[in-house]
């Protein structure tokens, strides 16, 4: 039932694949075709789904997403030095109402997750993020959701905070499994102060575009514990996508957004990637295809590293700061850093195990502590833990 709403990869694309060399992605993917049906997912690591929904919560209709144009660019990329099996499950057709599409997407992703397949979801409307989020209901997991977006998606029409926005739905609707939300690359002139205040009240972590672009390595710890990542291409500068109407002149460059995707792929706990609001321009199709490529590349480099404070693979650093005593850990395997935070009421409920609460950080945060300053990542995590 979960796959009945999927339209197979078109004959046009299949014919194009016949012209590709064996080293191209189009020749390596397992494809959902009219003739052979859904590929066997038992040994598949990732599955691509294109969502053709183009209706948003605002009642707007975006131009229909050209899945064939996107696939032509994606299939032409070369397969890396990967030992992965990737499937293309085709296109998810819009339902009678947008809610029907969300339900179908939820069922589809839940089935993929049950088979331990990581979904790669691509489409024109970021509201699909809610269907992706709800797919985790069956597994009763608390989720760290990461968003890459120039705006806070709380508004619909004239409402400053609308119950119809997908972020508001994640915050308020049961079952509430939102453990934490991190937003990357917002642009202040697109965000009302009331929205920023609400994020702060909920102990979410918003990061401005200018916080990250001087050194994109700052984004890696933000994604390290994320379970779901949703990317809105409005966060990318319009010139990078051929100047589509309605997109900002400011934003991430193509190189920067691809660096983010690589960090996301490396993130051990990330279980779903969505790339949305893709404008219908050749440059945008190619950029989104390259973003997927970099995510897959990062995925192949995963260590599946669960920090263990008693392991010999970690070096412990004690840093006394005034009345605080900070403890940092550095991995000898990956050179990644964590800082220990006391478990407060929220954290004890959200993470009921006996493991220490370790927050991803950078070596720069350790240097900050050595200068007798509390790192921002520690301050934010402490406030959230103690709520």
Image (cartoon, rainbow, N blue to C red):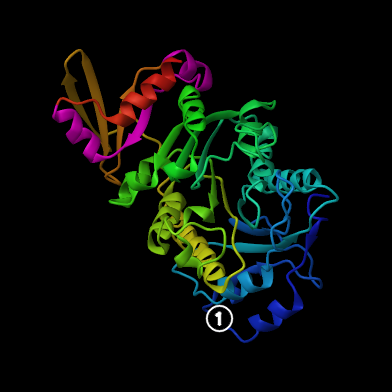
Residue at 44% over, 44% down: 189
Pick whichever, 256 or 71, lies toward us: 256
Tally of numbered tags = 1
- Residue 201 to residue 233: above or below: above
Query: On the image, numbered disc 1 is attached to which residue?
Result: 22
- Return the x and y of residue 383 as percentages of the image width and height: 39, 20
- Return the x and y of residue 235 as percentages of the image width and height: 48, 53
Q: Spot the residue most to the right.
A: 96
Q: Relative to 373, is 93 on the left or the right?
A: right
Q: Relative to 364, is 174 on the left or the right?
A: right
Pick whichever, 371 or 236, lies toward us: 236
- The segment highlighted magenta reads 344-371
- Residue 206 to residue 219: above or below: above
Q: Spot the residue most to the left.
A: 371
Residue at 19% over, 28% down: 369
- Return the x and y of residue 71 as percentages of the image width and height: 62, 71
Pick whichever, 218 or 48, lies toward us: 218
Residue at 65% over, 44% down: 132
Residue 300: tell me if it is visible.
yes
- Return the x and y of residue 178 as percentages of the image width and height: 58, 30
Q: Spot the residue most to the bottom.
A: 19
Callout 1: SS: loop
Residue 309: tell me if it is visible.
no
Pick whichever, 213 or 87, lies toward us: 213
Q: Residues within 10 Å of mark 1 (few under 14, many from 20)?
A: few
- In reply to whether residue 338 is colored magenta, the answer given is no
Q: Relative to 332, is 150 on the left or the right?
A: right
- In reply to whether residue 362 is colored magenta, the answer given is yes
Q: Quadrant of residue 359?
A: top left
């Amino acid at each position: 039932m979960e796959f009945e709403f999927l339209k197979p990869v078109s004959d046009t694309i299949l014919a194009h694949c016949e012209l590709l060399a064996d080293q191209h992605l189009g020749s390596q993917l397992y494809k959902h075709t009219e003739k052979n049906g859904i590929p066997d997912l038992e040994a598949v690591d990732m599955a691509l789904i294109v969502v053709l929904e183009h209706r948003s919560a605002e009642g707007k209709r975006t131009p229909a997403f050209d899945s064939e144009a996107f696939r032509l660019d994606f299939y032409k990329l070369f397969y890396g030095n990967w030992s992965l099996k990737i499937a293309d499950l085709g296109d998810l057709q819009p339902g009678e109402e947008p809610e029907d599409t969300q339900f179908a997407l939820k069922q589809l992703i839940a089935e993929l997750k049950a088979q331990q397949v990581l979904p790669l979801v691509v489409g024109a409307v970021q509201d699909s993020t809610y269907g992706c989020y709800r797919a985790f209901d069956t597994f009763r997991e608390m989720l760290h959701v990461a968003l890459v977006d120039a705006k806070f998606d709380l508004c619909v029409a004239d409402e400053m905070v609308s119950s119809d926005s997908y972020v508001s739905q994640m915050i308020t609707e049961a079952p509430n499994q939102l453990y934490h939300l991190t937003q990357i690359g917002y642009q202040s002139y697109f965000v009302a102060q009331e929205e920023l205040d609400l994020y702060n009240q909920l102990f979410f972590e918003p990061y401005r575009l200018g916080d990250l672009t001087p050194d994109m390595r700052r984004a890696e710890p933000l994604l390290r514990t994320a379970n779901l990542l949703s990317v809105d291409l409005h966060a990318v500068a319009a010139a990078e996508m051929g100047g589509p109407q309605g997109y900002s002149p400011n934003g991430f460059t193509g190189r920067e957004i691809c660096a983010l995707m690589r960090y996301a792929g490396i993130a051990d706990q990330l279980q779903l990637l969505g790339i949305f609001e893709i404008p219908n321009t050749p440059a945008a199709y190619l950029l989104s295809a390259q973003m997927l490529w970099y995510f897959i590349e990062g995925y192949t480099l995963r260590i599946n590293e669960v920090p263990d404070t008693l392991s010999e693979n970690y070096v412990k650093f004690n840093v006394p700061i005034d009345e605080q005593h900070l403890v940092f850990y550095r991995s000898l395997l990956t050179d990644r850093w964590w800082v220990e935070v006391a478990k407060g009421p929220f954290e004890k409920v959200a993470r009921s195990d006996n493991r220490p609460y370790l927050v991803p950080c950078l070596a720069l945060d350790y240097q900050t502590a050595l200068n007798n300053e509390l790192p921002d990542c520690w301050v934010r995590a402490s406030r959230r833990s103690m709520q």
